[in-house]
Image (cartoon, rainbow, N blue to C red):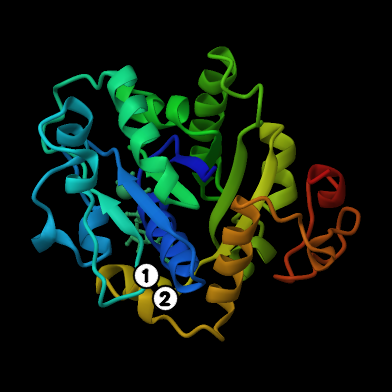
């Protein structure tokens, strides 16, 4: 069975689409069979991140509603190491029928090792659809007050709907900037985890290379020896069940976080946070 994940956020623009496309591209480069599903109805973007916009004939709602066979809606670029794609519908007003989407997913899942849903920000119907369809939810946020408050709202919704029972939602702390953390202008990942009472699955640095690769639809061309790619690879493996490697253990508050050199803060030991 594939790993199925919903990539959610409270506030917008925190990096969901970037991470969905980048993690998908890294796993595809590693030989995994990968599908990414854009659920941002009315705000299709993932196709552009993958450079596939000219190939889209049908969208995910067409596949779910039987306008075409699900396989026919899947967009592929066999010339590049990229995930397969189901594009978002342009019509944002229709409410998705969860049963139809679940049936579509069941028809496609046998062909993949990893399926990720790129959700719109917030807790609307199109945001909660992926959370209901996927086995695990990841909430992307940036380490600041506003983003944390909004992420907390999503966590509350998931918990209220009982979507945290099998796999508690995890956090991906994106756009971490060491210099801002040193000046206490961004929270340390341990503080984020402790404040939201959720595990941190990944800490992704602010990275110009990632921003440009996303803007240029060149996520498959990133330097595999760069730090950002190593972080993405580690996070991608973790979304497939890999444990937190020993090197990622955090020492008690105030001590250095090994991989990124960030300071643990807020009284939380990140080693505790991840157990
Ligand atoms: N780690 C990062 N380093 C640098 N830039 C980043 C990083 N993550 C995301 N970005 C940039 O932030 C911007 C917003 O990212 P993205 O579109 O992925 O956010 P989103 O959460 O999908 O937004 P929306 O809520 O509108 O769907 C993009 O320009 C992207 O390149
Ligand atoms: Mg997006």
Asked whether mark 1 and ligand 1 are closer than 8 Å, the reply comes as: yes
Q: Residue at x 39, y 32 (%)?
A: 106
Helix, strand or loop at mark 1: helix
Residue 163 found in image quarter: top right
Q: Is residue 9 above or below residue 113?
A: above
x and y, in percent, of residue 129 in the image: 37, 26
Q: In the image shown, does 7 or 61 lie closer to the viewer?
A: 61
> Is 37 placed left or right of 245 in the picture?
left
> Which residue matches tag 1?
211
Q: Is residue 153 above or below residue 108?
A: above
Distance (Cα) linking label 2 and label 1: 5 Å
Q: Is residue 167 above or below residue 56?
A: above
Q: In the image shown, does 181 or 236 lie closer to the viewer?
A: 236
> Is 67 placed left or right of 26 in the picture?
left
> Is 250 placed left or right of 216 in the picture?
right
Whether residue 213 is visible, yes or no, is yes
Residue 40 got which mark?
A: none
Quadrant for the C terminus, please: top right
Whether residue 177 is visible, yes or no, is no
Do the residues under discs 2 and 1 have CB atoms within 8 angstroms? yes
Residue 208 got which mark?
A: 2
x and y, in percent, of residue 2 in the image: 52, 45
Q: Residue at x 48, y 69 (%)?
A: 26
Helix, strand or loop at mark 2: helix
Quadrant observed for ligand 1 in the rendered image = bottom left
Q: Residue at x 28, y 53 (%)?
A: 85
Mark 1 surroundings: few (<14), some (14-19) or many (≥20) residues within 10 A = some
Asked whether mark 2 and ligand 1 are closer than 8 Å, the reply comes as: yes
Quadrant for the N terminus, please: top right
């Amino acid at each position: 069975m594939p790993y199925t994940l919903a990539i959610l956020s409270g506030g917008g623009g925190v990096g969901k689409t970037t991470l969905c496309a980048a993690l998908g591209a890294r796993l595809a480069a590693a030989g995994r069979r990968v599908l990414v599903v854009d659920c941002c109805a009315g705000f299709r973007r993932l196709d552009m991140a993958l450079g596939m916009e000219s190939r889209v004939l049908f969208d995910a709602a067409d596949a779910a509603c039987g306008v075409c066979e699900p396989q026919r809606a899947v967009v592929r670029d066999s010339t590049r190491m990229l995930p397969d794609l189901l594009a978002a519908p342009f019509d944002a007003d229709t409410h998705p029928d969860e049963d139809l989407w679940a049936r579509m997913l069941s028809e496609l899942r046998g062909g993949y090792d990893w399926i990720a849903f790129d959700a719109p920000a917030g807790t609307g119907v199109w945001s909660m659809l992926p959370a209901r369809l996927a086995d695990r939810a990841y909430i992307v946020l940036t380490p600041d007050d506003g983003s944390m408050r909004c992420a907390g709202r999503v966590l509350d919704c998931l918990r209220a709907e009982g979507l945290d029972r099998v796999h508690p939602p995890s956090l991906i702390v994106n756009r971490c900037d060491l210099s801002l953390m040193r000046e206490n202008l961004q929270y340390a990942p341990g503080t984020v985890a402790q404040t939201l009472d959720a595990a941190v699955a990944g800490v992704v640095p602010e990275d110009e290379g990632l921003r440009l690769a996303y803007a240029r639809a060149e996520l498959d061309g990133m330097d595999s020896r760069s730090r950002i790619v190593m972080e993405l690879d580690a996070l991608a493996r973790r979304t497939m069940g890999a444990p937190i490697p020993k090197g990622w253990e955090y020492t008690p508050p105030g001590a250095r976080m090994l991989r990124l050199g960030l300071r643990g803060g807020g009284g939380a030991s990140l080693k505790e946070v991840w157990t």
